[in-house]
Image (cartoon, rainbow, N blue to C red):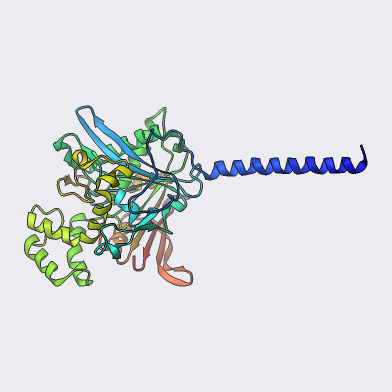
Amino acid sequence: MSRRRVVLASMEAGALLLLLLLLVAAVFLLCLCVPAVRAAPAGAEVTEFPGFHGELPSKHYAGYITVGHEQQNRHLYYYLATSERNPTLDPVVIWINGGPACSGFSAFHHSIGPFKIEYSQVHINDNPRVTTNPYSWTKMASLLLVDSPAGAGYSYAENEDDYITNDTNRVVDLYDFLSKWFAEYTEFLSNPFYIAGCSYSGVLVPVLAQEILKRNEESDGMKINFKGYSLCNPAVDVDIENNAHVPYAFRMGLISDELFQNLVSTCNGKYWNSSSPSCQGNMEQFYMDQEQALQKLFDPKLGREKLHAKQSEVSGTWKRCPNHIQYTRDIPTLTEYHLNVTSKGYRVFFYSGDHSLLVPFTATMEWLKKLNFKETEKWHPWFVENQIAGGLAMFHRTICHLKRLLPIRGG
């Protein structure tokens, strides 16, 4: 064989080896980038989202987890949107909604999820337009939302008395939900796990966090890889905060004079959790715009089919915050729970919008002072792209723990 042929053969072998290495690398990267939720229940994958046209940004799954016992089954609806970055390694975040009895799934398309609704089109279009959210948490984490308690959103109970509940029962159900959900989606057990929520979930999140830590210590088997929690505008005094919604909205010019006067005359200053049918009717108008758009998307039969939700004959009419749930707050103070979790070094993050209709950031600041944590950074401006976006203060209790308060302008 001539020297030229030997050189050519060597070059061809080298090229083939390089091509093989590139193919192996491509397959490896593909495995990293494409989520493979192997343990998901059959038929759980969602391929279409109501109002959205196009390919979903990542793999989505939905279904029900049954909690309680045989005589009192409660069926909690969940929706999982896997991380768009690396679902194998990225954190899993469960979102607990406020209310106190509002659909967790409703946060998916108006704040933290991969979609947003074009509310400006709701009044002229029977089919609200849904687009992608460039600020979705799914850019960096897998997002798990649950309709809790039973009766909120798509969740339902088999017995009417299960629509009478409280904080303690709800936390028990949420832990039961998580343990069963992880049993079905076992590949996420090793991922960092965080709890997040807003408003009334400020009552539930630290209690659920403590319950997870307690069960982890007692368990010889499955343990949830809990890392911490975050809260936005967390509830402190629910009655005062919720009853302030209507006067605040009126002073900000967000509702009409006519609606405000109707609310004043029918609710007598008690706008939240009112038993008056006329007050409830006016409050539905108060929250009308979002509720109207959401019901157009999620209540019809086709929307339910796309999202693997039971039809209305089983789960009832879809409502973000239904009136038929009788909810009692039975955990009056949260300081003990926050101290128990933070004393073990877990991460906690508070952030508040200074235009929040739900819970004013000033209440959060006053409440944080009661924890008596050492302030490591005095209040100072927080900048985004050289513009003041809010303020930041930092506190600590242990060497590895930071607690932050971050009010956000215009939020």
Q: Position of residue 152 (x, y in %)?
A: 23, 45
**Residue beneath the point at 41% across and 68% down:** 389
Q: Quadrant of the N terminus?
A: top right
* Percent x, y of residue 367: 29, 57
User: Which x, y percent locates residue 155?
Assistant: 25, 41
Q: Nearer the viewer, residue 282 or 183?
A: 282
Number of on-image labels: 0
Residue 357 in the image, given as x and y percentages of width and height: 25, 63
Can you tell which quarter of the image residue 178 is in? top left
The residue that appears at 88% across and 41% down in the rendered structure is: 5
* Above or below for 377 versus 46: below
Which quadrant holds the C terminus? bottom left
Q: Residue furthest right?
A: 2
User: Which quadrant of the view contains residue 73?
Assistant: top left
